[in-house]
Amino acid sequence: MRMMNGNVRRGGAATTASTSPRTATAHAHASHATTIFGLSFDGETTTGDSCQSQTHVQSQTLNAQRLALQQVTKLLDQTMLKPAETNMCHSLNELLQQLPNATISAVYEHFGNNNVPCTLVTALGGGGDYLRTLRWTFIEVDVPQTSSRIVVEPRFRESFDVAHPTPLLKKILNAIPEVFVGSTARLRTLVGVLSEHIRVSFHAQGIIVPPWRHEIAMTSKWFPQPSRCRRVSWAQPIRETQTPPITTATTLPNNSHKQAMKTITVPTPLEGCTVRGGALEGCTVR
């Protein structure tokens, strides 16, 4: 027997070599089985590894979300402050619970009536880069016998609201309180963290971050330059005085807080923007 041009000569007769139907079916099944298990002949991965990859990405995303929420929750934990700061925060929270509507003016008046050493602070904003130097008003409370100050911000969550947050940013915003009560150091760190999450949310949707949403602009609301800041303190009642107390630019009598609140002016908003609480918020450019 010898091979001739693909033919088999057996006993002088040539027959054509061919694959039996059973063998062809077996090869087809083997090829199909290879595809199902996610392997291709050239070594590329298909459905099987793709599902594993998607599961891995989803797991990483959930871990990142969990860590982000833990970071924000830790910054909001008042028990991790100094003892004097923690005690003051608890006292202020108890007073805030007595208010049905915690507006700036209501909180300032309520604190003053309860002999809380509070200061009405207004970041004047403006200047050459007015979109990054915002106008805002909040309350500071001195911690007795320390150099620490507690910031009370009734519009904290409102300050970071965006029109179309990503799922992660939405979870973070739901985790922060409407009213912030905490130290200035904790507030500065928290503003930086939240501003970064806002930046990531905008970029994930292919949207340019507005200048008033950048960290430097958000920080200017609660940490203005001294030259761009007005402070009005609620003075404690003065008793048994021979002459009327002298009213200074930064200290007003106890019954003059309403006049101080009247001095808070609202700037003219930019075209397409609205002003909430004295700051450029709610602009249509998202």
Image (cartoon, rainbow, N blue to C red):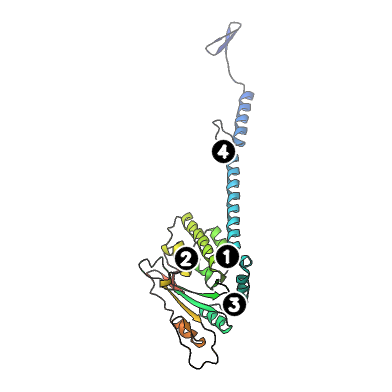
Residue placed furthest toward the top: 12
Q: Quadrant of the C terminus?
A: bottom left
Q: Is residue 7 left or right of residue 282?
A: right
Q: Quadrant of the N terminus?
A: top right
Q: Residue 62 placed where, x, y %?
A: 60, 53
Marks 3/1: CA–CA distance: 20 Å
> From the viewer's perspective, is residue 4 above or below residue 41?
above
Question: Crowdedness of circle 2 by 10 Å Cα count: few (<14), some, many (20+)?
Answer: many
Task: Tell me where residue 134 appears, x and y as whole percent.
Answer: 42, 69
Name the kind of residue labelled 4 in the image.
Answer: Thr
Q: Circle 3 is placed at which residue position?
A: 96
- Alpha carbons under labels 4 and 2: distance apart: 48 Å
Of the two numbered discs 4 and 2 in the rendering, the one whose residue sits closer to the viewer: 2
Sequence order check: which comes first, mark 3 or mark 2? 3
**Three-letter amino acid code at disc 1?**
Asn
**Distance Cα–Cα, label 4 vs label 3:** 59 Å
Check disc 2 and give the amino acid type.
Thr
Circle 3: residue type: Leu
Residue bearing mark 2? 219
Q: Secondary structure at mark 4?
A: loop
How far apart are labels 2 and 1 at the CA level? 21 Å
Foreground: disc 3 or disc 1: 3
Q: Which residue is mark 1?
A: 174
Residue 236 picture quarter: bottom right
**Helix, strand or loop at mark 3:** helix
Q: Residue at x 52, y 62 (%)?
A: 194
- Earlier in the chain: of badge 4 and badge 2, it is 4
Q: Which dot, 2 or 1, sits closer to the camera? A: 2
Q: Which residue is mark 4?
A: 46
